[in-house]
Image: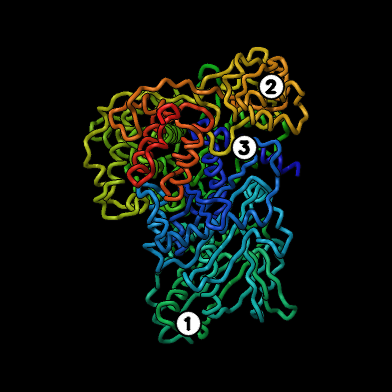
């Protein structure tokens, strides 16, 4: 348990650092951080945020936080991802465990979303500009080809049902439903599994294949300690059944990256299966596969396979499956020879890629071998250790850590003692980590291939490797300047990605695609103008300047227009972004180099808002889920001697959080308790400020974040404004929205959610309102637009009026 708490502490430090750096909400940062772990563990291939919550806590609940659309292209799967709404990062009293019944509610909510998207009832009510609507449409349009639905639930609590055979298993597979004719998968990723995936070298998701009756085998006569080899024969119907149930998860990751098996059938294999199935075993080379464990029945027959991975023969497997599906062929007559290598789980991560490489020596997988152990990747890692950032004022020189293998950064950090671990983290900040699979994205965008970057990290990496494989001296051409430019391209991408969300023209979806296209367009315009990027200046500053950001954002606006063009030939924006025509359309736009400067939003120092030093062994303070990390320019309360100058100016919710924190610790005295109750109720009674200040000091010492205490907004309203006013300024609209009573907002939210009109960004804005925080310009525009749309659809405009105007 102590190990899990330490990991949870580190995880949330990483989440909050990401939230501060990107200026996003902690729930968004948790989603991204956790999905990175799932992607690195090969559970998913990509992830895209798309938020919806509807009637949670009821038997009609719908939920989604994100999805992996690339899975459909890979093996006709639909992947839906949801994160726990009750994250425990700053809740001192929250339960650290989660029961099977609660997990099931989330899985049911994901399944209802899938079914509602499948039959179109979700789209009938949803906002058409949202990414969730686009994904739902994708499901409906492709439902004839969907084979399975995979649901991933992610939580920072520990799941209690692992040892209970009656509870939901962490990886559970169900037979296909009669109505949709698809298979269902349920995957629970709790804090323990996230920890194991971050630290482990083996597979993160396990599957056991039972073989009733067993399969006869011949074991190779060898004495190798770390592997055993078997020869066996599998009938086509058995192999097809495995593929139908598990899809691309049967394929080793390297093979999976280079092959898309959806609907593809080798003509020669199909002809043999249909006309001469008895000769398949003679004509076909069969499969090479690995497993981490086999169980035999004592007579030489294998009755169970653990973690089967096909390293050679993926196309054969898919062809057998699709031939059986399309031609209704009797696959029991097809015999497939299989060489099975059993590798212990501890060695699987190291040995399986080599087995894959050498068994694919005649095809493109091996020709394009730029894996983590290739000369190219090893040299990039070496260069990363040579490149020190310039000594900026108030900072130490650091490295941009190049992680060429999953978990390498954490492994190198955790094998050190406490003192050297801190030194390692200072020299190699986690936010300055470049993952091997992500590096090609920064390179191909700059080289004018945003449609390749939009394929997703794994496929972009595979394309990049294929392109580089033609250059036999690619590794020799690498040097420190190349690595520094790679870092600069990462800085450029991250900066524009962060600022896109604040732009007035941003429609709230496809942020990554817009950033990829913006970088490509800016780089193209530089080349057209005969200019070059001053990478040396970016490296010296470790940031871009205001003029470059202005140009990038203008390119981003142009990219957004092309990506969201209603005349686009491909309706789904994610799929449109993968097309050459999409890039060609953007290339036809005017130059972006004449844009005005845009000031860069700099990251504030850690804990600047609280002015409180966090102890080394303490989890840094953070707001509630879906509230922003503590870098907002909000009104700060005085912190000298931990005194609050005006307790009456604090919001009731702030005071309720103080009570919730202090009660289980028995910090409340009769005077402080009665004073807080008076403030919350609004009664005109005296309060004891000394008692309140003493209480606050004790709570702060125990870890209560001061920024939880927010001041009530003071809003002077301009007369004559209503929610449909088009001539009102942004400031007037903001003041108007912040004066609407909270109980009205509850009604507004319920009405809007029922019609799927409220997306994640709107919920984030509404969360700020509930905290008494000032809305940003973009949030003001979003909520004003929401109000207009709701009134047009029949919602009473009177509920959008401040109390004194009703």
For label 2, the SS is helix
Proximity of marks 1 and 2: CB atoms separated by less than 8 Å: no
Residue 148, image x, y percentages = 50, 65
Measure the C-alpha gap from mark 1 to mark 2: 84 Å
Which numbered marker is on residue 675? 2
Nearest to viewer (mark 2 / mark 3): 2
Q: Is residue 540 left or right of residue 708?
A: left
Q: Which comes before the other along the chain, label 2 or label 3?
A: 3
Measure the C-alpha gap from mark 3 to mark 1: 54 Å
Q: Which comes before the other along the chain, label 1 or label 2?
A: 1
Residue 233, image x, y percentages = 58, 79
Which residue in the protein does label 3 denote?
12
For label 1, the SS is helix
Which residue in the protein does label 1 denote?
280
Q: Which comes before the other along the chain, label 3 or label 1?
A: 3
The answer to whether 661 is drawn above or below residue 510 in the figure is above
The N terminus sits in image quarter? top right
The C terminus sits in image quarter? top left
Q: Is residue 91 left or right of residue 108?
A: right
Residue 336, image x, y percentages = 53, 78
Q: Quadrant of residue 758?
A: top left
The residue that appears at 53% across and 71% down in the rendered structure is 176
Measure the C-alpha gap from mark 2 to mark 3: 34 Å
Q: Is residue 326 left or right of residue 666?
A: left
Nearest the viewer among 22 and 461 is: 22
Residue 164, image x, y percentages = 73, 61
For label 3, the SS is helix
Q: Is residue 109 left or right of residue 163?
A: left
* Few, some or many residues within 10 Å of mark 1 (<14, 14–19, 20+): many
């Amino acid at each position: 348990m102590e190990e899990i708490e330490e990991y949870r502490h580190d995880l949330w430090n990483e989440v909050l650092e990401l939230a501060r750096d990107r200026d996003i909400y902690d729930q968004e940062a948790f989603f991204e951080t956790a999905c990175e772990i799932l992607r690195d563990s090969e559970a998913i291939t990509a992830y895209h945020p798309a938020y919806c919550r509807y009637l949670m806590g009821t038997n009609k609940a719908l939920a989604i936080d994100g999805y992996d659309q690339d899975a459909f292209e890979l093996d006709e799967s639909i992947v839906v991802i949801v994160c726990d709404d009750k994250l425990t990062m700053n809740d001192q009293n929250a339960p650290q465990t989660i029961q099977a019944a609660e997990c099931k509610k989330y899985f049911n909510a994901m399944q209802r979303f899938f079914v509602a998207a499948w039959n179109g009832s979700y789209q009938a009510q949803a906002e058409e500009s949202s990414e969730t609507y686009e994904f739902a449409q994708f499901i409906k349009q492709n439902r004839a080809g969907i084979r399975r639905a995979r649901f991933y639930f992610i939580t920072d609590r520990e799941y209690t049902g692992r040892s209970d055979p009656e509870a939901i298993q962490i990886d559970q597979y169900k037979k296909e439903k009669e109505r949709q004719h698809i298979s269902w998968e349920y995957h629970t990723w709790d804090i323990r599994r996230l920890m194991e995936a971050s630290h482990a070298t083996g597979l993160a998701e396990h599957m056991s294949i039972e073989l009733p009756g067993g399969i006869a085998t011949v074991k190779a006569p060898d004495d190798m300690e770390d592997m055993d080899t078997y020869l066996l024969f599998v009938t086509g119907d058995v192999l097809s059944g495995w593929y139908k149930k598990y899809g691309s998860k049967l394929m080793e990751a390297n093979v999976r990256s280079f092959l898309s098996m959806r609907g593809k059938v080798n003509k020669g294999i199909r002809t043999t299966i249909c006309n001469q199935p008895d000769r398949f075993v003679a004509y076909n080379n069969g499969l090479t596969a690995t497993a981490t464990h086999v169980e035999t029945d004592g007579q030489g027959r294998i009755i169970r396979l653990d973690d089967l991975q096909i390293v050679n023969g993926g196309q054969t497997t898919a062809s057998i499956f699709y031939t059986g599906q399309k031609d209704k062929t009797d696959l029991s007559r097809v015999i497939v020879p299989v060489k099975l290598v059993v590798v212990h789980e501890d060695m699987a991560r190291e040995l399986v890629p080599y087995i894959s490489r050498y068994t694919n020596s005649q095809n493109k997988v091996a020709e394009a071998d730029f894996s983590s152990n290739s000369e190219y990747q090893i040299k990039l890692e070496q260069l990363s250790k040579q490149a020190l950032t310039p000594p900026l004022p108030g900072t130490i020189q650091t490295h941009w850590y190049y992680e060429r293998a999953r978990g390498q950064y954490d492994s190198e950090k955790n094998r050190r003692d406490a003192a050297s671990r801190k030194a390692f983290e200072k020299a190699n900040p986690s936010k300055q980590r470049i993952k091997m699979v992500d590096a090609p994205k920064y390179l191909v965008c700059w080289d004018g291939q945003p449609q390749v970057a939009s394929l997703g990290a794994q496929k972009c990496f595979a394309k990049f490797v294929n392109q580089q494989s033609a250059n036999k001296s690619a590794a020799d051409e690498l040097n420190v300047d190349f690595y520094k430019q790679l870092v600069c391209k990462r800085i450029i991408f991250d900066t524009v990605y962060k600022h896109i969300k604040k732009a007035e023209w941003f429609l709230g979806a496809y942020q990554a695609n817009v950033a990829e296209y913006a970088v490509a367009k800016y780089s193209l315009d530089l080349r057209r103008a005969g200019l070059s990027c001053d990478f040396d200046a970016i490296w010296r500053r470790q940031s871009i300047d205001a003029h470059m950001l202005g140009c990038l954002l203008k390119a981003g606006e142009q990219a957004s227009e092309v990506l969201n063009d209603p005349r686009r030939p491909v309706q789904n924006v994610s799929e449109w972004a993968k097309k050459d025509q999409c890039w060609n359309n953007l290339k036809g736009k005017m130059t972006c180099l004449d844009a005005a400067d845009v000031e860069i939003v700099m990251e504030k120092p850690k804990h600047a808002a609280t002015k409180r030093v966090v102890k080394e062994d303490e989890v840094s303070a953070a707001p509630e889920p879906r509230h922003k990390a503590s870098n907002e320019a909000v009104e700060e309360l005085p912190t000298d001697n931990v005194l609050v100058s005006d307790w009456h100016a604090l919001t009731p919710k702030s005071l309720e959080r103080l009570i919730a924190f202090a009660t289980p610790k028995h910090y409340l005295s009769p005077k402080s308790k009665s004073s807080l109750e008076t403030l919350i109720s609004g009664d005109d009674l005296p309060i004891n400020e000394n008692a309140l200040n003493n209480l606050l000091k004790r709570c702060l010492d125990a870890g209560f974040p001061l920024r939880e205490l927010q001041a009530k907004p003071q809003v002077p309203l301009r007369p004559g404004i209503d929610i449909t006013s088009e001539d009102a300024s942004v400031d007037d609209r903001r003041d108007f929205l912040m004066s609407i009573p909270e109980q009205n907002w509850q009604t507004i939210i319920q009405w809007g959610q029922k019609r799927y009109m409220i997306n994640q960004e709107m919920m984030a804005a509404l969360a700020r309102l509930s905290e008494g925080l000032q809305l940003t310009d973009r949030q003001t525009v979003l909520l004003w637009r929401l109000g207009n749309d709701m009134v047009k659809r029949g919602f009473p405009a009177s509920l959008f009026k401040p109390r004194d105007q009703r």
